[in-house]
Each structure stands twice: as structure tokens, then as C-alpha cells.
Image (tube, helix red, strand yellow):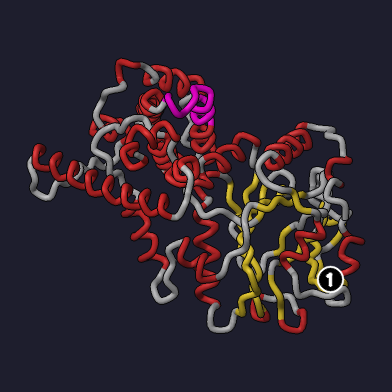
Amino acid sequence: MDKNLARQYEPQNELQKEFEAKNELLRSRFPELSPMEYLETIFPDKGDEDNLIVVFGTIKDKKGNIIENGTVGRIKFCEVWDIAWRSNAYIPYCSFKKDYYHSRTLETVRAFVVDLDNVSPRNLRQILNYVFKQIPLPTHVINSGKGFHFVYALNEPVKVKGLRWTLNTLNEAIQEAFKPFASLDKHPLVHPYRFPGFMTKINTVATAFKVKSTYTLEELLKLFKLNPKKSSVKTEKKESSGNKAKILFLPNGSRHFFEWFIWQLFKRPPYPGKRHNSFFALGIVSYKCRRYVPYEEAIDVVDMVYDGMERLNLHIGFTREEAHRAFQKGYNPKAVRVRWKFICGLLDWEYRPNKRNGRKREEHLRYLQKIRQIQKEEKEEHIKRLLARGYTKTEIAEMLGITRQNLYKTYGHLFK
């Protein structure tokens, strides 16, 4: 299959135009895979004569009458592209005993999949720009039509025997991680999905993009904070306690703080009674971080947060224009020096002051100054070791993540 097959279809309607816009956004960030490359990545152990289970969905007309009943087929690996024209053909990311498709005959798992419906280009930008910085990256992104599949592929098939509970729990945790940001369709491990190269319901061809390398099962369990010996309830409590606010007052406008703040808004969209205040607080934080966050990006985030409210029907009685007006009130130098306690009050978040372990303010400042001095001395020793190994000043600056000018300004005495 030609990986540019999708580009041969000219967009005919709004859905197809959105599909192509999402493709272009993904192409600007990730390498595109051909359908065959992707299929061989998921099923590296399959030969041309091996069977591949394909699930055909039921086809109905506009009135709901059944035109074709769903069924399960076993297609030769080398012949799978002969049915790529069908928009109701789906393939599970699993293998089954004797190729019998059933949850009880599940033998190995090859990937975990998150299925998001009705993802607009703006939703996709939200996920790429902000969500991916907080959630472990998937190995592949599949543009499957109106929605997306985020695939966490395993480096080798994992046998289900003895690990069924662990695999089901991990599958649920991965899907739940995306729940606050789009319309999520939760599915079990055996659920089939549309593969790249197959026709979608909007008459386009699904495309695949590689984000990163594959995972081991142990890596995914660690990344999603799961312990096979503990229940998922305890894990959720541990995660929620770690996401509470830990900042006393507004920091000096770092991008990291801005991304953390909107991450909280994505997870907990503004609800009635706090909607105006929430967008007002977003304006304050955006203005504080304006050095690293352009105004246009902050405006785009307002729409992303409002979209999250719409998905949960929290927007009723509060228009998008009101959200933008509240944001503009906060995007003002008069409010930039408000304290974190005030922001927490606007959002109805728990206010947790920083702990000094009983130290007074002056003692705490001396304590922090001592820590900074120790860190500086450690970095000086590190620079000395790099110089002894023959590294140039430019290489050292790059390794430290600073400019040559700042390197000379702070550590110039080491080069004399």
C-alpha cells in the first residue's frame, strides 16, 4: 500500500476537510507510516500465509434497517489489503487461540488503544500541545476519520495467562487518562479497530503516524502508576492526591506553570457558579506567563477549555463570548500580582501553603540560599570534569542547556 494513498482523495465536505487538516497537523510533527509498515509493526511475527482476524461490522441504512450482518473473518496476511475498501472492517490488536475470536480465547496482547470520537483540529492541538506533556506518549497516532486512535504498542506480544487482571486494569487506566479531554469510547482488550489504509465512514483513508518507540509491559505499568498487586482504586487515590495545588503564589511566569495550570482546567472543567471566575483566573495566569506563552496561544486555550465544558454539558447558560470576556478581564497588569490563595478561591481549589518545617521566613531564605550555593558548587565540579575530558565551551553550554554568554557570565572564572 502506498502511504500517500489518503492524499489522492480530494476533500468533498467539511468532515473530509477536517480530516485532511488533522493529517497536515500530524505530518508537521511526526513521520507518517505506510499501512503495510504499520501492520508489520503490530504483527511482526505474521507470515504471508498466516491468518489475520478481521471483524466486519453490521451495515445499516439511514432508517436503521440492516443491510449486511456483522461477522468475523480470517484473512491471509498477504490478502488483507483486498478488503481495505470496506469501511466496516476492523482488526483487533490481539491474537487468539486457534484464531477463534472471543474474550475467553484471548492469548496475547500486542497494544493498548485509546479511541476518541469527534476530535476536531482544535482538540487535536490541545492534545498535542498540552495533554501529551502530562500523559505518557503513545507509540502511534491513527487518524481514523472523525476520531483518533492513540496506540501504545508493546515491543513484543504479552501472553494473557496469569496477567489478565493486570492487562485489563492497565487498559482501563490508559483509556481513563484521556477521558477529560475528548469523547472517549471505552473498549475491552479484544475490541477491533480500523487500521491505517482502510476506508473510513467519511470516505477517506485512515492514516498512521509514529510518535515514539514501543513499550515494554513493565514500562507502561510504571508510567501509569499501576501495581499489579494493588487495586486500581488505591492507585486512583494516589494519583489524585499528587495532583493537588502545591504553589503558594504565582511564580515568575514560566511556561511550565502555565501548562500545569491549564492541565488542571482540562481535568476539572469549570462548573456552574465558577465558570466566569475560572476564565478570569486563566486570564491572570496567561498574562503572568505572557513572556513564554503568546497571546494567540492563550486565546486558543480558552476555546479548548470551553470545548471541554461542552462535552460535559457544563456550558449551558454560559456562552463562549462570556468566557472570552472573562479572560480579557484577567489578562490585565492590574491583576498580575494576585496571590495563589486568591486564584484558588476563584477556582474553588484547595489552598495549600508551602511548608517551611517550622522555619521563619528569614531562616527559610537562608536555607534556600545554602541549597543554591551547593547546587552551584556541584555544577562547577561538573564543568571542571567536562573541561578535563576535552569538551569545548560551546559543547559544555549545550550540555548545560544555557548560552555561551551565560556560561561565561556565571562560570567564567573556571575558564581562566
Q: For residue 271, say whether it is visible.
A: no
| Residue found 55% across the figure and 65% down from its top | 171
Q: For residue 292, say whether it is visible.
A: yes
Q: Nearer the viewer, residue 309 or 79?
A: 79
Q: In the picture shown, does residue 399 fall above or below 235?
A: above
| Residue found 62% across the figure and 67% down from its top | 154
Task: Examine the structure image and report whether residue 95 is included in the region drawn in magenta.
Answer: no
Q: Nearer the viewer, residue 200 or 239?
A: 239
Give the percent coordinates (x, y) of residue 49. 88, 77
Q: Tell me the kind of residue under disc 1.
A: Gly
Give the percent coordinates (x, y) of residue 220. 52, 65
Question: In the picture provided, is 252 more to the left or to the right than 88?
Answer: left
Occupied quadrant, residue 400: top left
Q: Quadrant of the C terminus?
A: top left
Give the percent coordinates (x, y) of residue 236. 39, 60
Question: In the picture provided, is 365 more to the left or to the right than 247?
Answer: left
Q: In the picture shown, does residue 299 fall above or below 105?
A: above
For label 1, the residue is: 73
- Badge 1 marks a residue whose secondary structure is strand
Q: Nearer the viewer, residue 205 or 190?
A: 205
Magenta stretch, residue numbers: 290-303
Q: Quadrant of the N terminus?
A: bottom right
Question: In the picture provided, is 42 more to the left or to the right than 189?
Answer: right
Give the percent coordinates (x, y) of residue 318. 46, 26
Query: Pointer 1: residues within 10 angstroms few (<14), some, or many (20+)?
Result: some
Q: Nearer the viewer, residue 332 or 392?
A: 392
Occupied quadrant, residue 345: top left
Question: In the picture provided, is 186 more to the left or to the right than 352?
Answer: right
